[in-house]
Image: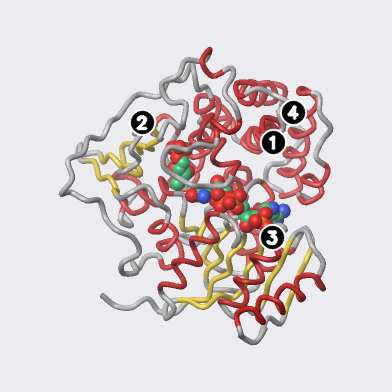
Amino acid sequence: MAPVTSRSVAILGSTGSIGTQALEVIAAHPRAFTVAALTAGGNVELLARQAVEFDVPLVGVARGQVEDVRAAIAAAAADAGRPASVTDVVVGADAATIAAGCGADVVLNGITGSIGLRPTLAALEVGSVLALANKESLIIGGPLVKAAAAPDQIVPVDSEHSAIAQSLRGGRADEVRRLVVTASGGPFRGRSRAELADVSPQQALAHPNFSMGRVITTNSATLVNKGLEVIEAHLLFDIPFDRIDVVVHPQQQIHSMVEFHDGSTIAQLGPPRMLVPIALGLSWPQRLTDVDVPCDWSLAQSWEFHPLDDDAFPAVRLARRVGEAGSTFPAVYNAANEVCVDAFHDGVISFTDIVDTVERVVEAHTGSELDASSVEGVLAADRWARHRAADLIGIAVDDDQIQENR
Ligand SMILES: NC(=O)C1=CN([C@@H]2O[C@H](COP(=O)(O)OP(=O)(O)OC[C@H]3O[C@@H](n4cnc5c(N)ncnc54)[C@H](OP(=O)(O)O)[C@@H]3O)[C@@H](O)[C@H]2O)C=CC1
Ligand SMILES: CC(=O)[C@@H](O)[C@H](O)COP(=O)(O)O
Ligand SMILES: [Mn+2]
């Protein structure tokens, strides 16, 4: 196999679950990549250690001071017995957007939430390949993000969408009859709505297969993650919502499937880990060697498939509605959910209140005055939804989050 030509990579959210695993992939394939930039929210210490280890010329943090970042890098370099060679440090709400525009061959957006929108657009604008883990930016930006992207400029990192892209093998969309997105069902799979009333944040964070950040893990428990992924699949692959199915597959060995018009279905398989989707995001369309271990066919095993229980978990049904409505509705669904996830973890609302509140915010949205084709319009919808959700659950709006979205 031909070696992957060396690519420069900027990682936004390098201290998170996606970001740290991306650096694992890069560390294991040092000839294939250089690291052009790293950014984090506020974890300056880990960011500094990463910057020293990967000899990174540009780092950014959303929350922190330049002097503190420089001091942390100097300390990390001293600990590692290496020179501190970072030249540029950017801080503040737009640090990730600045780093996204650094001109790296590939920008991996591993930030959580709608704050990923401007960085996504910045990476596309300068012509970098966008390895997209931050599904929220595509979902809320919709046509705006698609219009900014050249063909094949966005490579999905989300495991289901990577599986679909791999199953399509560059094939033609007109060959596709359906996309089948797999779902773990989350930690509460099989429970009725009544049995979900009292579940705790700690229980919601016990994902059956993946170790991920707090927001996506909670979204897996409510099935909001799957709702977002249905919209993401629609936007990435141009398949109408009524031809995108969800099937619950608790083992998560099949990461999604494509059914073709001739009745054939191609699925992508592998153990439930993110290393392969991340590596493909960085090296697409080439494959690196030995990124992960494959399924072990010497073991007896059974894989299950179940229909989704839309009554206990109405988030996917609601996502289909907002996806069909388009415009600013997906931004409203996502922003209301981000507020509700925080409120659930703060003990303000119950688990079932999350999607109930999102639904009430969506119902209240007319969208008529907002222009979904501009960043400002999308972020105005995001702000509106945060305020509406906060009002409904009786909390103050998180101004920091909104500030970062300007
Ligand atoms: N984890 C996974 O396996 C998968 C994740 N995804 C998607 O990838 C994205 C990242 O998820 P995950 O890695 O789990 O999340 P994490 O919470 O683990 O990581 C989030 C990253 O974003 C950084 N960050 C936080 N606040 C800001 C800010 N204001 N500006 C810039 N960066 C910030 C964090 O920095 P700090 O540490 O300093 O706070 C951290 O590096 C999400 O969109 C998720 O849906 C998709 C599929 C799988
Ligand atoms: C690894 C990944 O892509 C996550 O989005 C994961 O798939 C979550 O799975 P569920 O949302 O199906 O629990
Ligand atoms: Mn996923």
- The kind of secondary structure element at disc 2 is strand
Label 4 is placed on what type of residue? Ala
What's the CA distance linking mark 4 and mark 2? 30 Å
Note whether ligand 2 is within 8 Å of mark 2.
no
Q: Are marks 4 and 2 in contact (CB under 8 Å)?
A: no
Crowdedness of circle 3 by 10 Å Cα count: few (<14), some, many (20+)?
Answer: some
Q: Could you give the CA–CA distance between mark 4 and mark 3, rounded to whole angstroms? A: 28 Å
Mark 3 close to ligand 1, CB under 8 Å: yes
Mark 1 residue type: Asp
Q: CA distance from mark 2 to mark 3?
A: 37 Å
Which of the marked residues, 4 or 2, is nearer the chain's N terminus?
2
| Circles 1, 4 touching at the beta carbon (< 8 Å) | no
Near mark 1 (Cα within 10 A), the count class, few <14, some 14-19 or many ≥20, is: some
Give residue 9's position: percent from left, percent from top: 54, 71
Dot 4 corresponds to which residue? 389
Residue type at mark 2?
A: Val
Question: Up-down: is 333 above or below 149?
Answer: above
